[in-house]
Amino acid sequence: MSNSMNQTMNIMAPPRGELPCWGKRVDLGNFFVELVEAGSRRINVRLSKCFASISFDSDEGHSSLAGDRLRRYERRAYEFIVAPPGFPIRGESTSAPEVLVFVFDFDSIRQDVAAALQVSPDILEPRVIIDGPKVLTTELAQRIRRHMLRGDISKDYLRALCMVLLVDMMRLPQTHARSGRGQILDDALLESVLTFIDANLDSDLAIENLARLCGVVTHRFARSFKAKVGEPPHKFVLNRRINQARRLLVSTDLPIAEIAYTSGFSSQSHMTTTLRRQLGLTPAQLRDPAT
C-alpha cells in the first residue's frame, strides 16, 4: 500500500474533484473500494459521486464543520459516514486510522440497494449518514479488509461483500421506513449540513433541499434547525451569504457581479438591495468606506 507520508492534500486550497489513491484500490465496475493504511492524513475533496468510509480504529483530529473553520472531532472505531455527491470532505489528523473507502455512483446501485432493503427505489436518495459502530458493518468491514490484504482477490466475492456493507450503511432507520424521510436532525447531521451550506452558497439551498440532504422531513428539519442554531434555515443561509459577500468585497478586487453570484445572490442588484436592507450599506460603500 501507499506510504502514509503521502496522504497529504492542501486543505486550504480549492477542493479536488477526485480522491487520491492512498492505499490498495480495487475497481469493481460502478464503484471502487480502497483500503488506506493508518497515518498522518489531510484530505480536501468534493466528489461528483457518493463517498463512504468506515474506520478500523478511533480517531481525533480537525475537520471543517462550518465553512473555513477547522474544529476538533472525535470518531469511534467502526463509525462510518456516507456523503452525497458534492459534499465537502475536508480535515486533518496526525494519527488517522486505517479506513475502508468507497466511491460510487448512487443511481447505478439504487435498484440493488432498494431490492436488498425491500423498499421502493423512489424513496432512496443520496444523503448524509453518520452512524455506527454496528455489528454487521463491523464484521463486513473486517472481512473485506482481510480479503484485500491476502492478495488473491476474488472480485466477484469482494464486490458482493462490499455491496452488502454499502446496503447496511445506507439502511434506513425504522422512523424512515414508510416515507424514506426521518424525524430527527441530530448534532452530527446538523454539523454536516452547516458544512454543506458554507461550501455551496452559490447553489439552491432551499429548506426542502437541505432537508433532503440529510433525510429529515422538511418541517421537522426546519423546527430542529431553528432550535439548535437559533434562527430559521433561510435566515441562516442569507446571513452566511451576506457575510461571504462582505468579506470578499473588503478583502478582494473581484468584480461586484462575480461576488454576487459566488455568494449565492441571483444578480448584482439583488445583492445590493439585500446589503442595503440588512446592513444599511451598498457594495461600493463596503469596498470603499470613503464613498
Image (spheres, rainbow, N blue to C red):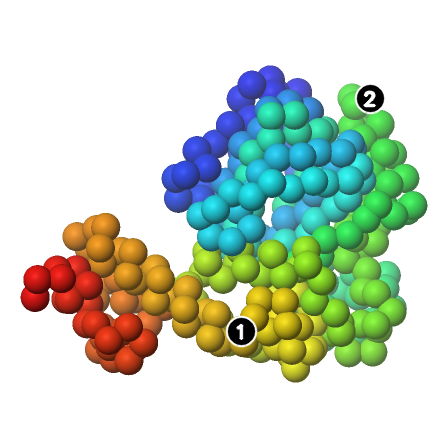
Q: How far from the left and from the top, in percent, is residue 217?
A: 69, 77
Q: Residues within 10 Å of mark 1 (few under 14, many from 20)?
A: some
Query: Amino acid under label 1?
Result: Glu
Marks 1/2: CA distance?
53 Å
Taking the image as shown, residue 174 lies to the left or right of residue 129, namely right
Residue 281 is labelled as none
Taking the image as shown, residue 258 lies to the left or right of residue 22, namely left
Determine which quarter of the picture holds residue 174: bottom right
Determine which quarter of the picture holds residue 283: bottom left
Label 1 or label 2, whichever comes before in sequence order: 2
Q: Nearer the viewer, mark 1 or mark 2?
A: 1
For image coordinates 13% across by 62% down, the residue present is 289
State the residue position of label 2.
Answer: 150
Mark 2 element type: helix
Against 119, is 116 above or below? above
Mark 1 element type: loop
For image coordinates 33% across by 72% down, the residue present is 265
